[in-house]
């Protein structure tokens, strides 16, 4: 199980009195249900517009219940977005659909607009799957952020940033296969010159909020923490059904 509710709550910088929200989605993914005797349609099951720490607390039980029931994941974009901007974007989309004669589910239009909407305070997600690379990735993100600040004429050092509460890397949240670094923007091209295979998500579904037990079981290497682990197993030769792991214990 991955439960990041408390870690996400620390990242709130507004409350219900503000015209802002965190976009939370419960998403069912087909690849999480491979091999099961049921057809899973990938997509969002439910959407929330979270307006405060207290609001997240109020919906937590329901989010967990839905994730457990559907075998789904909860994601939250921790870059706050504006309701006024969301309203304007929805009106623009609906006018476009009316002009073209396109009929769409209003809920889908709302969810699409919320996902597309940009934030005034961008938060990027650096997706680290190989934990042995974490320290070097963290160091590179800090270096690129410092470089960007200096190019703006600000006298700043890596130590300065590390000592501040407004550091470049805002949080590190566990995922199914590693961690998500929640970061302020940096030079993405220079980052990918060094780490071409590490994904950085600018305005995606965000980071993992909750993954149920049924989806989060995994083996990891005891030496480096990587999930890239292979095991020998007993398998029924006729049905390909998994029976048990082959262990040293006999």
Image (cartoon, rainbow, N blue to C red):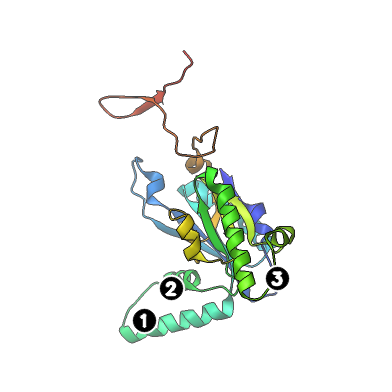
- Horizontally, residue 67 falls left or right of residue 158, namely left
Relative height, residue 91 to residue 68 (above, below)? below
Q: Residue 71: in sight, yes or no?
A: yes
Q: Which residue: 55% across, 33% down? A: 223
**Of tags 3 and 2, which is closer to the observer?**
3
Whichever of callouts 1 and 2 sits on the residue coming sooner in the sequence is 1
At which x and y percent is residue 20?
A: 62, 73
Q: Which residue: 38% across, 84% down? A: 96
Give the residue pinned by disc 1: 97
At which x and y percent is residue 6?
A: 67, 53
Q: Secondary structure at mark 3?
A: loop
Give the residue pinned by disc 3: 155
Rendered-image quadrant of the N terminus: top right
Q: Residue 63: in sight, yes or no?
A: no
- Given contact means CB atoms under 8 Å apart, are the residues at marks 1 and 2 in contact? yes
In this view, the residue farthest toward the left is: 238
Whichever of callouts 3 and 1 sits on the residue coming sooner in the sequence is 1
- The disc placed on residue 132 is none
Give the residue pinned by disc 2: 109
- Horizontally, residue 177 falls left or right of residue 139, namely left
């Amino acid at each position: 199980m991955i439960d990041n509710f408390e870690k996400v709550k620390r990242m709130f910088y507004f409350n219900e009195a503000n015209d802002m929200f965190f976009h939370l989605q419960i998403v069912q993914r087909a690849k999480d249900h491979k091999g099961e005797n049921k057809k899973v349609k990938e997509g969002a099951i439910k959407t929330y517009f979270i307006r405060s720490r207290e609001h997240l607390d109020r919906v937590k039980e329901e989010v967990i219940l839905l994730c457990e029931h559907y075998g789904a994941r909860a994601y939250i974009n921790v870059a706050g977005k504006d309701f006024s901007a969301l309203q304007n974007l929805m009106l623009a989309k609906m006018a476009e659909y009316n002009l073209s004669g396109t009929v769409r589910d209003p809920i889908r239009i709302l969810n699409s607009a919320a996902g597309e909407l940009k934030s005034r305070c961008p938060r990027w997600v650096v997706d680290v799957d190989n934990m042995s690379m974490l320290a070097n990735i963290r160091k590179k993100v800090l270096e690129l952020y410092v470089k960007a600040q200096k190019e703006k004429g600000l006298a700043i050092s890596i130590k300065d940033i590390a000592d501040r509460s407004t550091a470049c890397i805002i949080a590190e949240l566990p995922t199914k296969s590693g961690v998500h670094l929640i970061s302020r923007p940096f030079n993405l091209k220079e980052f990918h010159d060094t780490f071409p295979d590490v994904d950085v998500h600018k305005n995606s579904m965000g980071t993992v909020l909750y993954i149920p037990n049924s989806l989060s079981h995994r083996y990891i290497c005891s030496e480096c923490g990587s999930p890239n682990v292979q095991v020998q197993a007993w398998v029924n030769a006729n049905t390909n059904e998994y029976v048990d792991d082959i262990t040293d214990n006999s």
